[in-house]
Image: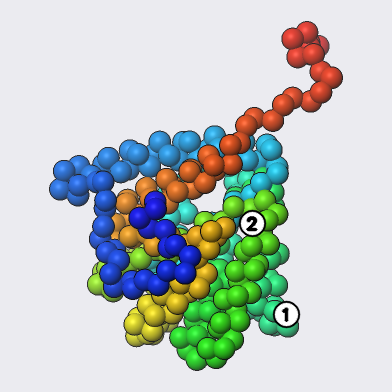
């Protein structure tokens, strides 16, 4: 995972990051099947770790997913979190702000959706939309963008200091791969419900988005809330990378099964 983590104050060019990479899994020699098998083991491990997280109730995990349209945010949630108990997990999608939300600062609605202790929270798109879409379309100035970068870092620092581990994944796909996935949505009647003409409009701003993402990664990847640039052209590899990272983050919490209620002699307890 260190290969994909954006170190603090490190400027990178997404054009130098290979979205086709499948490091450790040879695509021509059963790599896909091996990665899927490894991911299944990880999701099983994730199930056990999530139960401990929920039982202890003193830590939380926030997973942020960002990327261009069709980069696989929904697919990641469906695959990686397949074995997680829904009672201990919540998925939030941030759409266009409501009138009430626009009456507050841009992080107001986000803080309300941060996961409670004992839970895993997943942001399918997130507070980062407010330094991406708004910037690409010229709705806010560069000065405001810089202010928001600082405010986001401070917000995430607040969450971290209060027991929330944060993982942020940028799902990196190529423009050609996006074209293939959009065409699949158009040509497959079962997937047409996913297609929106707005996706084609946003695609016209591809280069602008790449620059906005690069600035975002540089300004907001911190020790307490790191960004990972995940090669996402191959869905099975994307899933393995993220599952591995999530499991490692939970294992780092050193979660243990909490002790039983004091004063109960379980050896002699009988239920009539």
Residue marked by disc 2? 160
Task: Please tell me how crowded label 1 is: few (under 14), some (14-19), or many (20+) other residues with Cα within 10 Å.
Answer: few
- Rendered-image quadrant of the C terminus: top right
At horizontal 40% and vertical 72% (from top left) the residue drawn is 11
Residue 33 x, y percent position in the rendering: 26, 42
Task: Please tell me how crowded label 2 is: few (under 14), some (14-19), or many (20+) other residues with Cα within 10 Å.
Answer: some
Residue 152 numbered tag: none
At horizontal 58% and vertical 37% (from top left) the residue drawn is 254
Q: In the orientation shown, which residue stands out farthest toward the right? A: 263
SS assignment at label 1: loop
Tell whether label 2 touches label 1 (CB within 8 Å).
Answer: no
SS assignment at label 2: helix
Residue marked by disc 1? 104
Q: Is residue 207 above or below residue 225?
A: below
**Total marks placed:** 2
Residue 50 image-quadrant placement: top right
Residue 149 x, y percent position in the rendering: 57, 76
Which of label 1 and label 2 is nearer to you? 2
Q: Is residue 205 above or below residue 255?
A: below
70 or 264, nearer to the observer? 264
Q: CA distance from mark 1 to mark 2?
A: 23 Å
């Amino acid at each position: 995972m260190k290969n994909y983590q954006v170190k603090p104050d490190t400027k990178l060019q997404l054009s130098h990051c290979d979205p086709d990479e499948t490091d450790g899994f040879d695509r021509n020699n059963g790599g896909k099947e091996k990665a899927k098998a490894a991911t299944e083991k990880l999701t099983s491990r994730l199930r056990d770790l999530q139960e401990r997280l929920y039982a202890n109730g003193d830590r939380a995990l926030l997973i942020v997913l960002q990327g261009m349209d069709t980069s696989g945010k929904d697919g990641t949630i469906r695959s990686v979190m397949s074995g997680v108990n829904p009672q201990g997990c919540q998925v939030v999608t941030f759409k266009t702000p409501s009138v009430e939300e626009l009456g507050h600062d841009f992080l107001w609605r986000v803080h309300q959706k941060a996961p409670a202790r004992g839970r895993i929270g997943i942001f399918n798109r997130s507070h980062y939309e407010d330094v991406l879409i708004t910037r690409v379309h010229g709705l806010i100035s560069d000065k405001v963008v810089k202010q928001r970068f600082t405010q986001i870092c401070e917000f995430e620092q607040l969450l971290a200091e209060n027991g929330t581990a944060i993982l942020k994944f940028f799902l990196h796909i190529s423009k050609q791969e996006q074209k293939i996935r959009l065409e699949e949505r158009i040509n497959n009647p079962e997937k047409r419900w996913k297609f929106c003409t707005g996706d084609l409009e946003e695609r016209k701003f591809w280069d602008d988005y790449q620059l906005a993402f690069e600035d975002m990664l540089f300004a907001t990847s911190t020790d307490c809330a790191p960004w990972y640039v995940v090669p996402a052209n191959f869905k099975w590899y994307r899933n393995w990378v993220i599952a591995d990272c999530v499991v490692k983050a939970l294992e780092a919490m050193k979660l243990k099964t909490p002790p039983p209620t004091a004063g109960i002699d379980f050896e002699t307890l009988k239920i009539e």
